Image (spheres, helix red, strand yellow):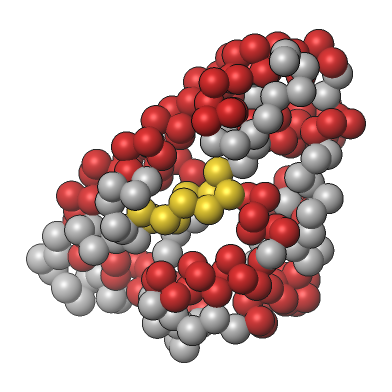
Amino acid sequence: DNLTNNQQLSYAQAVSTVYQTYRQQFDPTASIWGDKNPFHIYQLGKIRRYFPGVKVILIVRDFRACYGSVKKLVAKEQERGEVWPGIKTKAGLTHQWNQVVKIIEKYHQKWEQFYLVSYEDLVREPSAQLAKICKWIGVDFQESMLEFYQRNPDSGLVPPSQMVWHPNTLEPVGVKGINAWQDELSFSELETIELMNWKNLEKLGYKCTSLF
């Protein structure tokens, strides 16, 4: 109804109306809406054009951990006979991650509406980091924001069909994923990954362990 009641909406207005409607239905007390989609990062030019007031938060993670996470997903695929959509090869993931590094170089500390935070900092000190993010986007920080894992089972924050890919949404934020790649990757995998990505790994403060 919100869309049909407004016959002449621009693209930006139509998109905003959809999200505002979702907000009204699921959390009418929320003051803003947002969309978590990693592929938006490749469309920042269009997003900035249609939504000039947008604020972008980019969480960057150690590529070795990213690859280790995908490796576990592939194992789940084989176990369940289901396919998770997404890039899964070393070459494809390397290209994707390097594109993100280019985006960081383009926007970090050069565009005031772009906020960069590392996954490692976020899980080591979730309250402090989330408080900074909340202040930046203009909302009040509440510790209850970190209690999503308690609400998820009852509220269905993640659809049941997707839960196999997102089991950690049932657990509090923790640091166990930071160095899990050290056990998940073989030495040959680690060596290949670091050889392909060492410049950008070190540029972002991630020390290589197999090459130097």
Asked if residue 156 lies left or right of residue 16, the reply is right
Q: Which residue lies at the image location 72% right of the left edge and 35% below the top edge?
A: 65
Q: How many labels, in total?
A: 0
The residue closer to the viewer here, 170 or 196, is 196
User: For residue 34, which quarter of the picture?
Assistant: bottom left
Asked if residue 40 lies left or right of residue 188, the reply is left
Q: Which residue lies at the image location 73% right of the left edge and 51% below the top edge?
A: 166
* In the image, residue 41 above or below residue 170: above
Q: Position of residue 158 (x, y in %)?
A: 67, 61
The residue closer to the viewer here, 26 or 44, is 44
Q: Which residue lies at the image location 40% right of the left edge and 82% below the top edge?
A: 31
The N terminus: image quadrant: bottom left
User: For residue 69, which quarter of the picture?
Assistant: top right
The C terminus: image quadrant: top right
Asked if residue 175 lies left or right of residue 126, the reply is right
Q: Position of residue 128 (x, y in %)?
A: 61, 71
Q: Which residue lies at the image location 22% right of the left edge and 71% below the top edge?
A: 4
